[in-house]
Amino acid sequence: RRTVGLAQCTPDNMLSLLALTAALASRSAVTPSYLRLRGGDVDTVTNGMALLQVASGTFAFMAPERNIEMYGYDKEPTKVEVAMMRYLAVGQVVLGATSVAGLEGGSKAAQAMSLSGGAASLLACAPVFEALGGPKEPLAAWIAALAVLGKATRAGKVKSVVPGTVLGGIAAAQALVAPDKTWEAYKNKLPATEMALALFSLAG
């Protein structure tokens, strides 16, 4: 069976993302210690779920075709479907890191991780989106916005979770409500299949 992949989006990119999210997690305690969630059972469950998310995301990124096949998809994955699987995969890694950050530092730490991790995941998969033939400006704008707001939240300069929630809501809504229209709006040259749009929507 022929392997469909994007050579530019390499395992090195994924490892870089993992290193970055781990580094951010170690610095994400932006709330006072007396507000942090404690408790062995909660810690164990959250850490376990985070580990599963990271493991699942890493596998999906490294072997997107195999991951798609495991869910019963019996067609040959297209280039776009493989790309969207990898995009969804890095989101899983960020979700795992966000869970740990929230456990250790509370809601603001979780949001800081989610924003900074979102920027890192988009940057790591920039070659994926570039291969789809769309313009680079929207991607650069999202990376910059998420990175700046994430850093400000982590540094305690943003006191409210509202800005991050609104930005995240916009990103999620455009993919969930109208993935086909969003795909067209980003002017990707390669057409998206139903499976690709489903993965794109989940990643949002």
Image: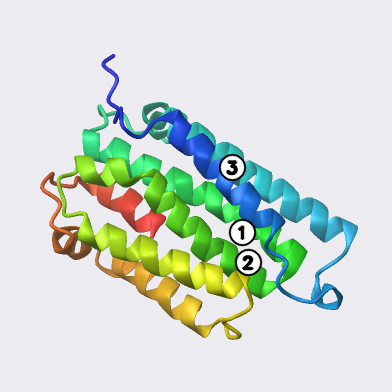
Could you tell me which quadrant the C terminus lies in?
bottom left
User: What distance separates the C-alpha of mark 2 from that of mark 1?
Assistant: 5 Å
The numbered mark, 2 or 1, whose residue comes first in the sequence reads 1
Residue under label 1:
98
> For the view shown, which residue lies furthest in the right direction?
40
User: What distance separates the C-alpha of mark 1 from that of mark 3?
Assistant: 14 Å
As shown in the figure, which amino acid type bears the numbered disc 1? Thr
Kindly state the secondary structure of the residue where label 2 is placed.
helix
Residue 157 sits in quarter: bottom right
Q: Nearer the viewer, residue 112 or 61?
A: 112
As shown in the figure, which amino acid type bears the numbered disc 3? Ala
Kindly state the secondary structure of the residue where label 1 is placed.
helix
How far across and how far down the image is residue 67, in percent?
A: 43, 32
Disc assigned to residue 19: 3
**Residue at x 44% of width, y 50% of height:** 121
**Label 1 CA crowd tier, 10 Å (few <14, some 14–19, many 20+):** many
Q: Nearer the viewer, mark 3 or mark 2?
A: 3
In contact (CB < 8 Å): disc 2 and disc 1: yes
How far across and how far down the image is residue 147, in percent?
A: 46, 64
The numbered mark, 1 or 3, whose residue comes first in the sequence reads 3
Left or right of 160, for residue 47? right
Residue under label 2:
110
User: What distance separates the C-alpha of mark 3 from that of mark 2?
Assistant: 17 Å
As shown in the figure, which amino acid type bears the numbered disc 2? Ala
